Each structure stands twice: as structure tokens, then as C-alpha cells.
Amino acid sequence: NSVMESFFSSMKREELYRTKYRSESEFRTAIDEYILFYNEKRPHKKLHYKTPQQKEEEFALQTIE
């Protein structure tokens, strides 16, 4: 639950409160884009400023070895 609370807090602060949307479609597109950004490009403090994708790749390399 705390993971989702953190995500929604970040999404509100970094995307939703900064933008005025002209339509529901524009809003939905922005949410989809933010989710991709959050999961693939945004560094996370708890992951030592790596993206979740980088951390998963690092983990995958460790399990192969």
C-alpha cells in the first residue's frame, strides 16, 4: 500500500498539479505517459537513484551469474 501511495503522491506532484488538461483524452494520455516515465526513466531514491528498469536489469545479471 505504501508503494502505491508514494507513486500517486509523485504523480500528483510531478504531473497532475503542474498541467491543465483540455480534455479527458489528453488527461488519460498524460497518465499513461507518466506511468511509463515513472517505471522506465525516473530515478528512484530507494533504488540508489537508478530507474526500476536499470535495477531489474542489474538483478537479472546477478541471477545469471
Image (cartoon, rainbow, N blue to C red):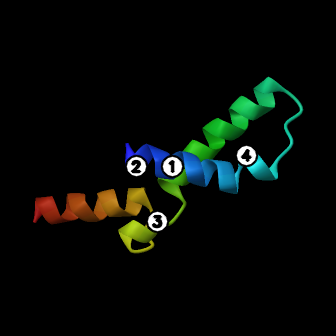
Mark 2 to mark 1 CA distance (whole Å):
6 Å
Where residue 1 appears, as percent x and y from the top left, is 37, 42
Does 22 sit left or right of 4 as displayed?
Answer: right
**Between discs 2 and 4, the one toward the N terminus:** 2
The residue that label 2 is drawn on is: 3
Three-letter amino acid code of the residue under disc 1: Phe
- Please identify the residue farthest to the right as the structure is shown: 22
For image coordinates 67% across by 55% down, the residue present is 13
Does 24 sit left or right of 46 as displayed?
Answer: right
Image mark for residue 7: 1
Camera-near label (4 vs 3) is 4
The residue that label 3 is drawn on is: 44
For image coordinates 40% across by 49% down, the residue present is 3
Contact between marks 1 and 3 (CB within 8 A): the answer is no
Contact between marks 2 and 1 (CB within 8 A): the answer is yes
Pointer 2: residues within 10 angstroms few (<14), some, or many (20+)? few
Secondary structure at badge 2 equals helix
Mark 2 to mark 4 CA distance (whole Å):
18 Å
Three-letter amino acid code of the residue under disc 4: Leu
Pointer 3: residues within 10 angstroms few (<14), some, or many (20+)? some
Secondary structure at badge 4 equals helix
The residue that label 4 is drawn on is: 16
Mark 4 to mark 3 CA distance (whole Å):
19 Å
**Between discs 3 and 2, the one toward the N terminus:** 2
Three-letter amino acid code of the residue under disc 2: Val
Secondary structure at badge 1 equals helix
Where residue 49 appears, as percent x and y from the top left, is 45, 73
**Between discs 1 and 3, the one toward the N terminus:** 1
- In this rendering, the answer to whether 1 lies above or below 49 is above
Secondary structure at badge 3 equals loop
